[in-house]
Image: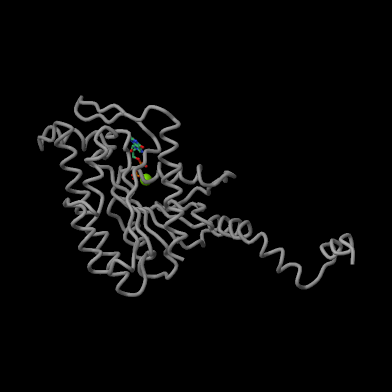
Amino acid sequence: MTNENESWTDLVPTIAKPVVYAYKYRKFIQEYWKKAQVKVGMGKPSVIVTGRAGVGKSVLASHYHGEANTQDWNEPGTSTDVEIKPITIGDWTKVVAVIPGQNSQERARSLDEALNKTDELDGVIHVVDWGFTSIREAAVKKEMVESRGIDTIYKIRQHHLSLELNDFESMLDKLAMSKANGRGPKWLVIAVNKVDLFEKDLLDAERYYNPSCKSPFTNKINSFLKTVGANNIKIIHLPVCPMPEPFEWNGEIVAPQVDSITKQRNYLRVFIDKVSLVQNGVK
Ligand SMILES: Nc1nc2c(ncn2[C@@H]2O[C@H](COP(=O)(O)OP(=O)(O)O)[C@@H](O)[C@H]2O)c(=O)[nH]1
Ligand SMILES: [Mg+2]
């Protein structure tokens, strides 16, 4: 048989053909299937983004989506507080849900859903910001400065760091419970956000979040690892800053130290690459 004859088989419809076609284009098919699922609100999240209100979850998720998904896609306006996005992580497109940080019924429900009602959860991206948390309400800011004496950046950061630690501990408790029931994530990424505000002190920040170092934060990680077994979950920590901007508190200002778009995008690219690696590694 000649080559021309062979290539004809491509044009002949057979039963096997669609299977070959589907195999060849499986990643695209899966991507559009995930998008369709998200659009009609039936996509179960396989990755969740957690962390306190104001640490930058929504900004990170939308930059992640934009950078990881070459073809942009109009997200549906969500009626709930949970934001859902299809994001390509590693080889496949995942349904990623951003869980609201404020204590609310919606938060409890969506966390419970992801951790206790599905076997499909791949990973958790837990966002922290080394105390540089944004407070939106002017009245709350005023009250903290005037009535509680939290009047310097140092003090507000200490305040947020302690709340961050409590929030992280309660998150780890939920993860441990979920793992004990044979569910839960295969990986946990600690996204150390807003590094533009502390790039000069990057090593100190890393010492605080790196499980190989000793800190109140890493103590929580290490006792969690003892509970669930270090082989049962992969934990990594990564710096990121999708949207550098100054941090202001009571007239005091910290300026962003990451001032080039290239550098900011590099942080995000490395972040995306490492999350992909960890996702591909656990399959
Ligand atoms: N300096 C700096 N600030 C950021 C960055 N990302 C987010 N923020 C700030 O954090 C605020 C809260 O972000 P948002 O994504 O709404 O937080 P969420 O409540 O966790 O969803 C934003 O309005 C920004 O002011 C960043 O990369 N660097
Ligand atoms: Mg948000």
Q: Is residue 30 left or right of residue 112?
A: right
| Vertical relation: 239 (above or below) 32 | above
Query: How far across and down, in percent of the image, does residue 232 sit?
Result: 33, 68
Image position, residue 202 (x, y; %) = 27, 38
Q: How many marks?
A: 0
Left or right relative to 270: residue 251: left
Q: Nearer the viewer, residue 77 or 271?
A: 271
Q: How is the image coloured?
A: one colour
Among the 4 quarters of the image, the one containing residue 60? top left
Position of the N terminus by quadrant: bottom right
Q: What x and y, as percent, mark residue 20?
A: 71, 66
Ligand 1 placement by image quarter? top left
Q: Say if 67 sits above or below 257 in the image.
A: below
Query: Picture quarter containing residue 222?
Result: bottom left
Expressed as whole percent of the image width and height from the top left, the position of residue 50 reads 34, 53
From the viewer's side, name the closer residue of 45 and 146: 45
Q: Residue at x 43, y 41 (%)?
A: 268
Q: Residue at position x 75%, y 72% from top? A: 16
Front residue of this view, candidates 46 and 260: 260
- Residue at 10% x, 38% y is 148
In the image, farthest residue toward the top: 251
